[in-house]
Image: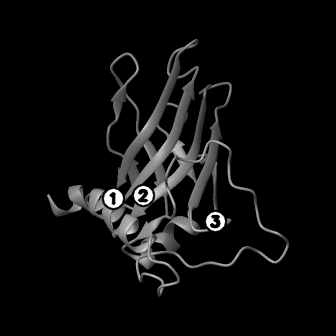
């Protein structure tokens, strides 16, 4: 129950600490300078009203930054897609893609922001788009907030609301 409420608590805490004028930075907020090369522009579809990613566990964020890719079971676990983690300001962004093969066709794309991250869970706000898998012509677009969690000591976060778009169960995994 506590882990389920963590993203909501994170949002409430972020709202409180980010409105303090010139106050000290919250220990839960990410403090990172924009890269010397000018950084990366924030995506145009950034979640509305999100001022910063709330971090309850820095080591979890480090695992996400150093991820080893993402997969969708219909495409396969052998050849992971790339997942890029950027932070041009106070918000952590994820952008990834896995493309299938002739034997296992399809495409998975993920694009959005991390709202909050804890030891075993993080809240993602964005889109997950699954196309042409497991059946040709399937087009599954999911938008909004979604939770990823590590369960049973696995070495990946798994999308928790797995059933959507025609009742199929999609295992979207992000590895660390």
Neighbor class of circle 3 (other Cα within 10 Å; few <14, some 14-19, many 20+) is many
Neighbor class of circle 1 (other Cα within 10 Å; few <14, some 14-19, many 20+) is some
Distance between the alpha carbons at the discs numbered 3 and 2:
21 Å
Q: Quadrant of the N terminus?
A: bottom left
Reading the image, the residue beneath label 1 is 150
Label 3 element class: loop
Q: Residue 44's quadrant in the figure? A: top right
In the rendered view, would you say 3 is above or below 107? below
Distance between the alpha carbons at the discs numbered 1 and 2:
6 Å
- Could you tell me if the residues under marks 1 and 2 are in contact, i.e. CB atoms within 8 Å? yes
The mark that comes first in sequence, 3 or 1, is: 3
Q: Residue 60's quadrant in the figure? A: bottom left
Q: Position of residue 163 (x, y in %)?
A: 33, 29
Q: Position of residue 57 (x, y in %)?
A: 38, 75
**Residue at horizontal 40 percent and vertical 64 percent from the top:** 117
- Looking at the rendered structure, the number of numbered marks drawn on it comes to 3
Q: Residue 137's quadrant in the figure? A: top right
The mark that comes first in sequence, 3 or 2, is: 3
**Residue at horizontal 38 percent and vertical 16 percent from the top:** 166
Query: Which label was assigned to residue 87?
Result: 3
Residue extending farthest right = 37
Query: Which label was assigned to residue 5?
Result: none
Residue extending farthest top = 137
The mark that comes first in sequence, 1 or 2, is: 1
Reading the image, the residue beneath label 2 is 156
Q: Is residue 27 left or right of residue 152?
A: right
Residue sitting nearer the eye, 123 or 53: 53
């Amino acid at each position: 129950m506590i882990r389920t409420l963590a993203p909501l608590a994170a949002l409430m805490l972020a709202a409180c600490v980010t409105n303090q004028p010139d106050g000290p930075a919250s220990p839960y907020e990410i403090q990172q300078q924009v890269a010397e090369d000018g950084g990366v522009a924030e995506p145009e579809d950034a979640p509305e009203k999100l001022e910063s990613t709330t971090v309850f566990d820095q080591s979890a964020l480090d695992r996400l930054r150093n991820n080893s890719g993402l997969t969708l079971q219909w495409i396969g676990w052998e050849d992971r897609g790339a997942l890029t983690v950027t932070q041009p300001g106070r918000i952590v962004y994820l952008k990834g893609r896995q493309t299938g093969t002739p034997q296992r066709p399809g495409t998975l794309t993920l694009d959005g922001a991390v709202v909050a991250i804890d030891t075993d869970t993080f809240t993602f706000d964005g889109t997950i788009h699954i196309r042409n898998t497991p059946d040709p012509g399937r087009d599954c677009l999911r938008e909004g907030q979604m939770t990823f969690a590590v369960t049973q000591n696995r070495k990946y976060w798994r999308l928790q609301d797995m059933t959507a778009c025609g009742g199929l169960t999609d295992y979207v995994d992000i590895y660390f």
